[in-house]
Structure formats: C-alpha cells, structure tokens
Amino acid sequence: MKPKKIQKPTNTKRNKKMFYEPICEKYIDPFTDFGFKKLFGEECNKDLLLDFLNELLFEEQGKIVSISYLKSEQLGITKYYRNAVFDIYCENEKGERFIVELQQSDQPFFKDRTLYYSTFPIIEQVHKGKKWAYELKAIYVIAILDFVFDEDKHNHKKYRYDVKLTDIETHKVFYDKLTFIYLEMPKFNKQVDELKTRFDKWLYVIKNLTRLEYLPDKLREVVFEKMLAAAEVAKLSREEYFSYAENIKVIRDNTNCFNYKLEKAIKKGVEKGIAEEVEKVKKVMEKEFIKEMKEKEEELKKEIEEKTKKEFEAAKREIEELKCLLKKFTDEDK
C-alpha cells in the first residue's frame, strides 16, 4: 500500500501566505503539542494511553481496566480566577483522575503549576448538600519533561520522581490520594539491548520516535506497532499535516528566538566580564606596583642607613686617627 501524498497548500485564506518547511522525519514528534495529543489524546488511540498508564502505575494501581477522556479546559471558580488547559485529562473506572502533561522546556514555577492543576480535579469532586463527607478519589498529575530539574541535574540515574504528601520525620506517606510523577526524559539514555521492562520500552519509544526508521525486534509488540502506525507522517490527513507543520514551525521559531537572545546575553556577559576582568587586573597591578614601590622604598632606606652607618664609622675612625696623631705631636713638643 503506497503512502498518501500530501498535497501542497492552495491559496486559501488559511494557507495563502503560509509556507512550511518539509517534514523529513518518518514519524511525528511526541514532544510537540500536536504529536502528543495525536498519539495519546484521541479516542482511537485510547488504548495507547491506557497501556502507558498501566505500566507507569502498575505497582500502585494494579491494572486500570478502562479510561474515559474528560474536558481538558477547566474554568476557574469565578471569572476572576485563571483557567487551566490540560494536555490530557481522563478518569478510570473507579473515578480516579489523571492529568498527563508534556513540558518541552523548563519554566519558572513549573512545580507550582502542576500543584495548581491538581486543584481542579479536587474541586470537581465537591458535592452539593450536607451529605458529602469530603471523600475524594485519587488524583495523579503526570508530567513528561524534555528538561531536567536543576537540583538533581548531576544525578543521571534519577529520571523518575514519585511525589506524595509525606511525614518528614517518619518518611511515611501521610496522604496517598494525591500523586505527582515527573519523568525527566533527557536522563533516560538506555539503548534497545538495555530495555528490561515494558515501561523502559515506553520511555524509549517516546524519546526516540522521530529517530526510528523501523521498529526494533525487541519492541515488536501490538501496542508499539499501533503507536508507530498512528505516528506516520505520511498517514496524516491534509489538515493534520499542516497543523503539525505549523506546530513544528512555532517550536523552531521560539527556539531560534531563545537561542538568539541567549547568544546576545552571553556576548554581552562576555564583554561585561572582560571589562570587569580588565578592571580587576588593573587594581591588582596597582596593588602590586604600590607593594613593589614600598618594598623598593624600604630597600633604599636600608641602603641609605647602611651607607650612612659605614660612612659614620669611617669618619669616626678618621677622627680617632687624627686624635691619636695630634696627641703624638703634643707629646713630642713637651
């Protein structure tokens, strides 16, 4: 079966002045908003998300039987409160909620943001009336990160964080219905022959999808075969292709702007640093010069003192000799 050819955009209002660079990769990038939602957020690919969640949470959850997608846009309590838009929001057969987020780059207060997101599933569970006893279903906030946290960036083996409310003294979980899981994908560097668990395989496929040309034998399982089939760029509809291309363009533009600003900041910092270093060197040289001049002054004083002492001693000896000579002449006259 030949892959579908992607037609070039016509001069519609949407594409009249829009040009996209060709997409060279065989599979879409799951680290884009379009790619992530295409692979894990569509009803036809729900089994991919279910399998991923089962591998991620199996030790704690057991097997999740089914999931249902929920509305990803959450409104604030009032119009004065900020809304939230989740990448993927779903619940399982027990009513437990799962927020799954993909974060491409680090940003200030990202952990605060995930905590803020967790408040929406909590508020959703509030029941009207006096009969509600504050019982809550479990909430999971899962963040797949394309960056690493600063505090553990040198610990290359630590790429998964499971966070719960815990007592500081006993280190025991105090409340087990609120869980945050962070996956630092740049630290996951296992090769195909190092993959030991199904979860390893999931992380490998997510991280390396755009680099793959075919599915390695070790990954030939139904779920991964379906994922690669869903990720083929050639199988995207015309509308999907241009949505993805626009997503890629925005990311590239943002990356280029960031790199340009970073380069300017570095250049400015280097220039400022050089100027500061020159001033430091000047101050050091001034101190060294002053120190050297003081040392020379001390040496000169010593030389003068020694010379003066020698001259004084010589003059003293001459006087003594003259005294002796004068005494001799005086004695002879007598």
Image (cartoon, grey):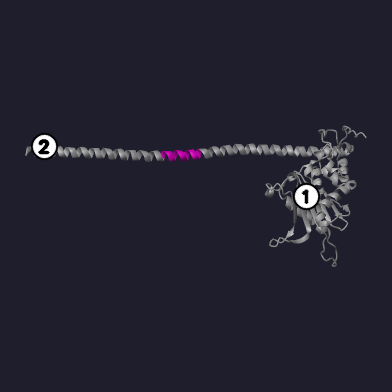
Dot in front, 2 or 1: 2
Q: Nearer the viewer, residue 263 or 99?
A: 99
Q: Is residue 226 above or below residue 92?
A: above
Q: Nearer the viewer, residue 138 or 129?
A: 138
- What residue span does the magenta drawing correspond to? 282-293
Contact between labelled residues 1 and 2, with CB atoms less than 8 Å apart: no
Q: Could you say which disc has been placed on residue 83 in the image?
A: none
Between the C-alphas of marks 2 and 1, the distance is 116 Å
| Residue farthest along the bottom direction in this orientation | 130
* Position of the N terminus by quadrant: top right
Using the rendered view, name the quadrant where residue 129 is placed. bottom right
Report x, y in % for residue 317. Answer: 21, 39
Between residue 37 and residue 217, name the one nearer to us.
Answer: 217
Q: Quadrant of residue 217?
A: top right
Image coordinates for residue 295, horizontal then vertical, percent? 40, 40
Question: Which residue is located at x 37 percent, y 41 percent?
Answer: 298
Q: Quarter of the image for the C terminus: give it.
A: top left
Q: Is residue 282 left or right of residue 235?
A: left
Q: Secondary structure at mark 2?
A: helix
Residue 101: x and y, percent? 79, 49
Visible residue check, residue 85: no
Q: What residue did someone put label 2 on?
A: 329
Side (left or right) of 286 relative to 247: left
Residue 158 counted in the magenta span: no
What's the residue type where badge 2 is placed?
A: Phe
How dense is the environment of label 1, judged by Cα within 10 Å: few (below 14), some, or many (20 and up)? many
In the picture as drawn, the residue positioned furthest to the left comes out as: 334
Q: At numbered mark 1, what does the secondary structure look like: helix, strand or loop?
A: strand
Question: In the rendered image, which residue does mark 1 sit on?
Answer: 143
Q: On the image, which quarter does residue 36 sit in?
A: top right
